[in-house]
Image (cartoon, rainbow, N blue to C red):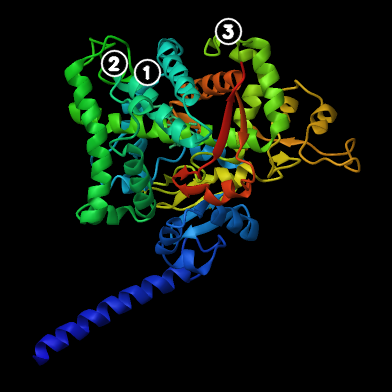
């Protein structure tokens, strides 16, 4: 008995001493990141940010840390957040810092990894090749009719609704159906049948749980065996994998993303291992639908909350697509600067992945210099889009407000004084002649940057342009009378991809 007790006490003493010395080391001036300021709790343990991420307010928390501590903040014992556009190339550019374990943590696995989670840059570059072919200009052109068909269906479904709609729900359905079409040549009919299989609940449940795990990826391997967590993530994975298996069985008459991922366009190359297809198939659907739906919901919220912007955009759309013209004919999109400005301004204020993705300096090696900042081996980091994109040093004036005109001034399509005339709440006393203008696109990172950036960016832009043109051509839209616009920011929550609140919209056909 006393032997057992002695063993227990020594064990306890060992672990207590281990924990204490780890904590003291992390807080000490000898820690390699000691030069970087940050809150005590972040320096002490990664669990602080992991628990905070469960509130969905990580984007706001990191922004507030930058406001308090400066451009580089220590947000974990071995992790930094940057609000410093000058490190863009060194961190995210060619030869920059490899991806960190964040995405592997979210997937509860270190082996079954899709493209987005591959940390070795050489393996990542090889795996990205078919993705790059799948999003070439020619490939995108072939997806256009498929997306257009879904946009027309979205319009019809909305026309059939009575009174008011929760617009984001229909964007979810649209984004998921069109992503399944483009990725696998079909497989989902949410717009037609509704969400009978609770696909979106599965996606949102998985997001919430994995927000925590992304901060403590090593725990993911254990949590994968816990019934609630493992089952939730596996439900999402197995649902998406079934779409891939069906596509393999069915084949496709059209060129879809899978056509490229499976090397069907390159018979000279060996067939792609089915395991890679399964892992990347999940990625295609989840990465492509939730993000696009988030962007569309934010965009329509911004338009509805700023009716004068909606009217100007409608005028541009009416010019190119009067009643009877097909709003999904892409030929005019490049000539529509205000449309692009509205999309960019939405992504600036409400990036669908507000905290961006992680990079990590390899454990073995010398560390790196990011501009003036030395970063030791093993350090993980973010270049935090939400903080950068609302920083007055990067976007001024009105850094926290929806002002699409800033993009016209930057593209020299409008003078500053003309743009200021359309600014939010500008009173006569505003010094129109003397105001500074800042516009730093190195600080605009909704799709990240460099060789591991969002490969689907142009598809997302295409979907957004088509939906906006079609909906504004066909409908008068307004928010439900009395709905408080502040609700949007309260419900715009960072679970890696954002969840967004219900936006109640009253639709009336225009013609
Ligand atoms: C508005 C919509 C979208 C936004 C804001 C967005 C944003 C992002 C971001 C921030 C990343 C991380 C890049 C990094 O690790 O540095 C990413 C990666 C990725 N996205 Fe998107 N995305 C969108 C739509 C799409 C669409 C429609 C697809 C189509 C399948 C897609 C496919 C991917 C893929 C495959 C990756 C992994 C790229 C890699 O690791 O090389 N995304 N996206």
As drawn, the residue found furthest toward the bottom would be 2
Labels 3 and 1: the sequence-earlier one: 1
Give the Cα distance between marks 2 and 3. 32 Å
Q: Position of residue 303 (x, y in %)?
A: 64, 33
Instruction: Pick the residue in front: 111 or 179.
Output: 179
Image quarter where the C terminus lies is top right
x and y, in percent, of residue 506 in the image? 58, 33
Marks 2/1 in contact by CB < 8 Å: the verdict is yes
Does the closest atom of ligand 1 sit within 8 Å of the Cβ of label 3?
Answer: no
Q: Is mark 1 within 8 Å of ligand 1?
A: no
Question: Is residue 465 visible in this depiction of the protein?
Answer: yes
Q: Which residue is mark 1?
A: 134
The label on residue 259 is 2
Quarter of the figure with the N terminus: bottom left
SS for dot 3: loop
Lower sequence index among marks 2 and 1 = 1
SS for callout 1:
helix
Residues packed near mark 1 inside 10 Å, few (<14), some (14 to 19) or many (20 plus): many
Q: Quadrant of ligand 1?
A: top left
Q: Quadrant of residue 176?
A: top left
Dot 2 or dot 3, earlier in sequence: 2
Q: Which mark is residue 325?
A: 3
Q: For the residues carrying marks 3 and 1, which lies nearer the camera in this image? A: 3
Determine whether 227 is above or below 306 in the image: below
* Residue 153 image point, x, y percent: 43, 19
Residue visible at 50% across and 40% down in the picture: 91
Residue 446 can be seen in this image: no
């Amino acid at each position: 008995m006393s032997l057992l007790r002695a063993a227990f006490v020594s064990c306890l003493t060992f672990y207590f001493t281990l924990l204490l010395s780890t904590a003291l080391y992390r807080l000490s001036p000898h820690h390699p990141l000691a030069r970087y300021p940050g809150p005590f709790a972040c320096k002490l343990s990664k669990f602080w940010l992991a628990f905070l991420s469960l509130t969905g307010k990580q984007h706001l928390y990191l922004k507030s840390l930058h406001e308090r501590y400066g451009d580089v903040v220590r947000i974990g014992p071995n992790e930094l957040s940057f609000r410093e556009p000058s490190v863009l190339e060194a961190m995210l550019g060619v030869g920059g810092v490899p991806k960190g374990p964040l995405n592997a943590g979210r997937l509860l696995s270190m082996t079954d990894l899709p493209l987005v989670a591959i940390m070795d840059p050489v393996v990542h570059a090889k795996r990205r090749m078919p993705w790059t072919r799948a999003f070439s200009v020619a490939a995108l052109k072939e997806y256009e009719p498929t997306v257009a068909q879904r946009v027309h269906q979205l319009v019809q479904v909305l026309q059939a609704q009575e009174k008011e709609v929760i617009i984001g729900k229909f964007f979810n359905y649209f984004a998921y159906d069109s992503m399944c079409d483009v990725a696998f040549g079909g497989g989902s009919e949410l717009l037609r049948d509704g969400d009978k299989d609770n696909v979106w609940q599965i996606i949102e449940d998985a997001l919430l749980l994995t927000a925590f795990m992304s901060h403590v990826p090593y725990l993911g391997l254990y949590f994968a065996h816990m019934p609630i967590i493992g089952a939730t993530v596996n439900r999402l994975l197995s649902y998406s994998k079934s779409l891939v298996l069906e596509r393999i069985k069915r084949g496709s008459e059209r060129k879809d993303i899978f056509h490229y991922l499976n090397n069907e366009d390159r018979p000279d190359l060996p067939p792609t291992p089915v395991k890679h297809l399964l892992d990347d198939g999940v990625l295609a659907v989840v990465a492509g639908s939730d993000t696009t739906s988030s962007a569309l919901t934010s965009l329509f919220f911004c338009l509805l909350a700023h009716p004068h912007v909606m009217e100007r955009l409608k005028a541009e759309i009416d010019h190119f697509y009067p009643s009877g013209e097909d709003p999904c004919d892409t030929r005019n999109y490049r000539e529509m600067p205000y449309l692009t400005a509205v999309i960019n301004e939405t992504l600036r204020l409400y990036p669908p992945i507000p905290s961006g993705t992680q990079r990590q300096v390899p454990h073995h090696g010398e560390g790196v210099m990011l501009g003036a900042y030395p970063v030791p081996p093993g350090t993980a980091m973010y270049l935090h889009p939400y903080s950068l994109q609302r920083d007055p040093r990067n976007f001024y004036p009105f850094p926290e407000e929806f002002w699409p005109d800033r993009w016209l001034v930057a593209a020299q399509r409008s003078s500053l004084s003309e743009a200021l005339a359309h600014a939010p709440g500008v009173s006569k006393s505003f010094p129109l002649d003397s105001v500074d203008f800042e516009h730093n696109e190195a600080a605009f990172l909704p799709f990240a940057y460099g060789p591991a950036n969002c490969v689907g960016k142009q598809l997302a832009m295409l979907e957004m342009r088509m939906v906006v043109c079609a909906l504004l051509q066909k409908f008068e839209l307004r928010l439900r009378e009395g709905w408080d616009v502040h609700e949007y920011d309260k419900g715009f929550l960072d679970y890696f991809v954002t969840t967004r609140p219900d936006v109640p919209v009253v639709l009336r056909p225009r013609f």
